[in-house]
Image (tube, rainbow, N blue to C red):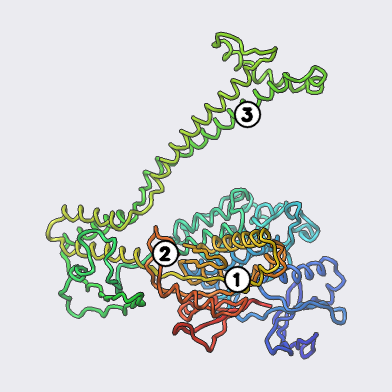
Amino acid sequence: MIGETISHFKITEKLGQGGMGVVYRGIDLDLDRPVAIKVLPPESQQDEDSIARFLREAKTASKLQHPAITTIYEFGVKDNLRYLVMEYIEGKTLKEILKNGSLPIRQLLEITIQVADALSLADEKKIIHRDIKAENIMLTDRGQVKILDFGLAKMVEKTGPVAPDHFQTAGGVVMGTITHMSPEQALGAEVDSRTDIYSTGVVIFEMATGQLPFGGSSANVVLAKILNQPAPSPSDLNPEMPPSLEKLIRKCLEKNREQRYQSASNLLMDLRAIKHEVEQVREWSGTVVMPSAAKDRPSGVSVENLRELIPATPSPAPAAPPAGRVSPSGRGAAAAVLPVAPPIPQSGATQAMLAADTTAIRRALSKEPSRALRLSVLPAIYLLQALRKAIGWTAGVYSFACITLFALSLLATEQLRALAFVLPLLHRFLDPGLAVVGSFLPFPLIFQNADFLPVAVGLALYLAQLGVTGGLEKAEAALRRIVERKPPTAAAVFQIQQQHRLATPASASRMSLLREYAVAKRMLSEAQKEMAFLAVDVAGSTKMKLGEEKISIEHAFAEYKKFLERIFRECRVYKVAWTPDGVMTCFSSADDATTAGRKVITDLDFFNRDVHQLRTKFRVRAGVNIGVVLIPEDKPLEEISDHTIDVAGHLQKEAEVDTLWVSSEVHERLMDRSGFTRMDTQVDGHEVFAWRRPV
């Protein structure tokens, strides 16, 4: 077929062939862009299963507009040959990359976050991929993930999960990849979005360790391990793995789907939290930027005397320190760049003291409970939790039975005949307890031939269980605070170090200086942070409100606010400030802010179609900027004034409708730069890159 033209796509070369079709490279003659053309083989043109799978791949992928999902351009039939035209991707599959071994943790997280984000969109559209594996994940040269092969994907009906169908089995073998199948998929049972989460966990395990969690000499051996054996510990194969990532992998690979992540959105939130945790790990070396402000610092440390904390005498031939980053000036604030002290020769005693003091500093900074403490407290927590639930359920059932018995006693005899089988069971269950309680009462609780003893016992038991379970819950919370203690503030750490310094001999003065330097650096990192700001505003909001009823306008904008809040939560927003028709948000990274802006613009189609009822559609413009800003924890965003925030607002005002404008500083930090074009204009001296909603 090379050289032939299908529709307006010319076939140029054959890329490969598989069981579900032949893939060619082609050229879009109208737009002059490369495309991939998948053609169903002639021998499969009469096979209903193959045709159905081919159609399913086209329909499901076309419903998902996401940077990490291959874009479908066209589907059709020519000369009885069914073809599918899609985006041409230059890159390697994840399977090819993993031939060289496991991936670094940060790269692993970057890839998995893109996969989970795409699956969260599929989850929203009620689509299950059912064959997530390394072979079906491609990486472009710029690090963009692309999920391939939606041939096994399935739409979830409103009535429930996907039931087994004849497309899932061929010759008695469950379709899909054995090594990546969840237990329920391997058994041919109903599947849902949690099946994709299990397969994603297998891919994460493979990226982290370089091998699959379950392998074997035959498919039956692999299936037996999937169904019966726990997955090996990833940290045994990769000691550098963070405990939080290992916990995430174990949760994805739970055999009981009820114990896995219940949605890809929840998985995405934890992945972003782990990425943030990994990015916070910093060496205590490099150049530090010291602002002139001295607000909220503990006594004994100030910008003026921070220079005195650095040893002034260099060792012979010191290595050149790395270049420092200069903080962008905000409101005329001055900045001083302090290089790290060069290494100082130390005696054996001083080195021993250095190791001990470093351990003390890390303990003070982390406040992480010891393993022995956790092992002793966690069983008590689980015991209290089980006891609280047991008491709550038992007392609740007994109270409900008491009230039911009293209600049935008020019915007429004719009505009781229909419930003749219930009363004996209730009496057998309740009479022993009621008899014990009645023996302590000085008089019977009978009024107008109605026995109120069951009501009194039921209410008393219910109130008692509220008190008991409440006390157990408080005790459980107190124990949890012991094993989940939060890091102390910089001021508290400084006080701890000052106390430790008093107990340290004079010979360790250099170590004391280093500790104080580390505290000062930590305080500055807490005070000023590099944050990304996203501004979003409704375009033509005044025109939208003309001719509409006030209650309709209020309802539509309230739903719009909920729509934005959901997206911001998914992208881990830090602070939010609302205006009548717009919003300014703060994120910890440029990727999170840009992802939120893209998602707002693309998901508005769904919002306009299925949520609000105004005659005019919601259309927005957005802008993102990033910079080092003083962000007090207890201060709302609307009370914080900074040039970085102002630039984000100006970018939003200058942007076109359905367009996201980002500064060049944001663009440099983005992992996914696809879809951005450089603009000829500048905003407040910043170069601008624009991203427009896909048509």
Mark found first going from the N terminus, 1 or 3 = 3
Q: Nearer the viewer, residue 161 or 523?
A: 523
Mark found first going from the N terminus, 1 or 2 = 1
Q: Would you call the spot at circle 1 few (<14 residues within 10 Å), some (14-19), or many (20 or more)?
A: some
Residue type at mark 3? Val
Mark found first going from the N terminus, 3 or 2 = 3
Q: Would you call the spot at circle 2 few (<14 residues within 10 Å), some (14-19), or many (20 or more)?
A: few
Find numbered disc 3 in the image and state the secondary structure of the residue it sits on.
helix
Find numbered disc 1 in the image and state the secondary structure of the residue it sits on.
strand
Residue 553: percent from left, percent from top: 66, 62
Distance in Å between CA atoms under marks 3 and 2: 52 Å
| Residue topped by disc 3 | 397
Question: Taking 176 as reference, is 502 left or right?
Answer: left
Report if the CB atoms under discs 1 and 2 are less than 8 Å apart: no
Q: Nearer the viewer, residue 488 or 505?
A: 488
Report if the CB atoms under discs 3 and 2 are less than 8 Å apart: no
Examine the rendered structure and indicate whether residue 201 appears above or below residue 21: above
| Residue topped by disc 2 | 639
Which is in the foreground here, disc 3 or disc 2?
2
Distance in Å between CA atoms under marks 1 and 2: 22 Å
Examine the rendered structure and indicate whether residue 623 appears above or below residue 262: below
Which label number is shown at residue 538?
1
Say which residue appears at 55% left-offset and 70% top-offset: 536
Q: Nearer the viewer, residue 227 or 695?
A: 695
Residue 436: percent from left, percent from top: 57, 13
Q: Quadrant of residue 313?
A: bottom left
Say which residue appears at 47% left-offset and 75% top-offset: 625
Say which residue appears at 30% left-offset and 67% top-offset: 284
Find numbered disc 2 in the image and state the secondary structure of the residue it sits on.
helix
Position of the N terminus, as image quadrant, is bottom right
